[in-house]
Image (cartoon, helix red, strand yellow):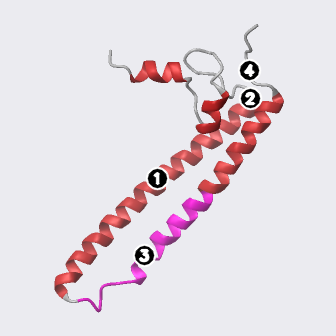
Amino acid sequence: MERKRYSDLELQEFKAVILKNIEFTKFSLGDLKSSLNHEGENGTKDTSPTFKVLEEGNETMTKEQKAKEAIRLENFLNLLKLALIRIENKTYGICRETGELISKERLMAVPHATLSITAKLQKTQPC
């Protein structure tokens, strides 16, 4: 008999993994935002004009990279929160394409996954 969903005990295991991921992601996001807000404190006022242009360009690129990383972390955080909702609804771990259970190994590695490996590979295959 094929299982339709994960047991309540298994869902609690997944929830613990997701909560750890949320905690770590919030911490990382906080550090990143803090560094973005305080980045200008090491200015280029005392730098020669030749190097000042290079340093300011590098500072702008670093700031853009950090902003992109912050957006990525915020998106990841939202996906983890949606996974918690699926746990509460007892729909966590069910592939949204096939309706089959996503493997436990995949969910431990990618706790916000909504597709089984089979469905994921089918989506990435060229038509």
What is the quadrant of the N terminus in the image?
A: top right
Amino acid identity at mark 4:
Arg
Q: Is residue 45 covered in magenta?
A: yes
Q: CA distance from mark 3 to mark 2?
A: 42 Å
Q: Earlier in the sequence, mark 4 or mark 3?
A: 4
What is the crowding at mark 2: few (fewer than 14 residues within 10 Å), some, or many (at least 20)?
Answer: few
Q: CA distance from mark 1 to mark 3?
A: 18 Å
Name the residue furthest top.
1
Between circles 4 and 3, the one closer to the viewer is: 4
The answer to whether any part of residue 80 appears in the image is yes
Q: Which mark is residue 121?
A: none
| Residue that carries the numbered disc 1 in the rendered image | 71
Q: Quadrant of residue 123?
A: top left
Which region shows up in magenta? Answer: 26-47
On the rendered structure, is 89 left or right of 108? Answer: right
Labelled pair 3, 2 in contact (Cβ < 8 Å): no
| Residue that carries the numbered disc 2 in the rendered image | 89
Dot 3: what SS?
Answer: helix
Q: Quadrant of residue 58?
A: bottom left
| Residue that carries the numbered disc 3 in the rendered image | 39
| Residue that carries the numbered disc 4 in the rendered image | 5
The x, y position of residue 85, in whole percent, is 69, 36
On the rendered structure, is 91 left or right of 63? Answer: right
Amino acid identity at mark 3:
Glu
Relative to residue 76, is residue 28 depicted above or below? Answer: below
Amino acid identity at mark 2:
Asn
The x, y position of residue 9, in whole percent, is 83, 32
Q: Earlier in the sequence, mark 1 or mark 3?
A: 3
Q: CA distance from mark 4 to mark 1?
A: 32 Å
Q: Nearer the viewer, residue 71 or 116?
A: 116
Dot 4: what SS?
Answer: loop
Q: Residue at x 16, y 83 (%)?
A: 50
